[in-house]
Image (cartoon, rainbow, N blue to C red):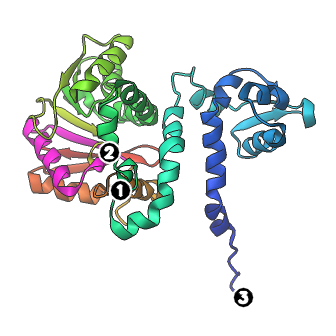
Amino acid sequence: MNTPVPTPDAILQTAFGFWNSKVLLTAVTFDLFTKLGQRRLTGAQIGKKLALHPRGIADFLDALVAMKFLDREGAGPDAKYFNTPATSLYLDRHSPRYIGGILEMLNARLFKFWDDLPEALRTGNPQNETKQGGKGIFDELYGDPAKLEQFLDAMAGLSRINFEALADKFDFSRYDSLCDVGGATGLLSIEVAKKHSHTQCISFDLPPVESVARKHIAAAGLSDRIHVTSGDFFQDPLPRADVVTMGMILHDWNLEKKMKLIRAAYDALPPGGALIAVEALIDNARRENVFGLLMSLNMLIELGDAFDYSAADFEEWCREVGFTRFEVVHLAGPSSAAIAYK
């Protein structure tokens, strides 16, 4: 029996993948999906709105059609383009589920920084603004309120589906209080408070974030259920609560700082309390979750010694601190909640 000869399709698809990525990121940066909204426009009409040269309009729009990010009615110059249900929901900035902010950040920053992945792998050093003597991402953001709010909104868009899933899938009925560490806009607390009326929430983050969190919490009508507290989670004790959550927080740090945060959570919890880490957890065999592994490389690009981790890693670290029981709850896409019980 002859063994089939493998094709190079997967190799070529991945090698040329940055073409697809750049077309989508450019469309978001141009605000294409927002400007389309619920309308159907010809290529010429779109080109006028986006100030595009005629040469690339059809190729650009039809590439998005072929990638299933736009739909098209008709053919030729009179064809009309319109949003798909997914781009209407997630890439029109008028939608409450807009996730384009993180795509804008990918285009503006990370696309060019990832060009230096070889240097990052050889040196172990970050490849972001610090490479040219600039401030690190967190120093830059926390020194500029406008940039900080833009970043927090971008991360909220990326996190929303996971926080909604956590509020649905984790049994909060046994817990009366929650502290979300690194709470940002307060989104995790908002999602839990909306679904679990008995749970009082605390959104804990650095002082510059407080006004942003209060604004989002007030807009959700939950100011009476969610308390905003400011502090530095490496310097100050965490507020006491029955549940401590960390949404995409632990992966930002090296092992020493990860352990410090896990110990701080243990100290803030009562017996039976739970620490929940929401991340794109790498599978224990390190063979399946491509996004989790790439996110860990992104932490190398951004921060050098920070890294993503598996559920087995999380359990090992938490056992060392004193946690005794563990579980993993899949949330959405590549993301899961790693849970440790005191």
**Relative to residue 36, is residue 6 depicted above or below?**
below
73 on left or right of 24:
right
Asked which secondary structure carries label 1, the reply is loop
120 on left or right of 273:
right
Q: Residue at x 26, y 21 (%)?
A: 210
Any part of residue 181 in sight: yes
Q: Which residue is mark 1?
A: 126
Contact, mark 3 vs mark 1 (Cβ under 8 Å): no
Q: Earlier in the sequence, mark 2 or mark 3?
A: 3
How packed mark 3 is, by other alpha carbons closer than 10 Å (few <14, some 14-19, many 20 or more), is few
Q: Which residue is mark 3?
A: 2
Res 245 quadrant in image: top left
Q: Which residue is mark 2?
A: 136
Asked which secondary structure carries label 2, the reply is loop
Any part of residue 286 in sight: no
Q: Nearer the viewer, residue 149 or 321?
A: 149
Q: Amino acid at mark 1?
A: Pro
| Identity of the residue furthest to the bottom in this view | 1
Contact, mark 1 vs mark 2 (Cβ under 8 Å): yes
Image: magenta residue range: 251-279
Q: Amino acid at mark 3?
A: Asn
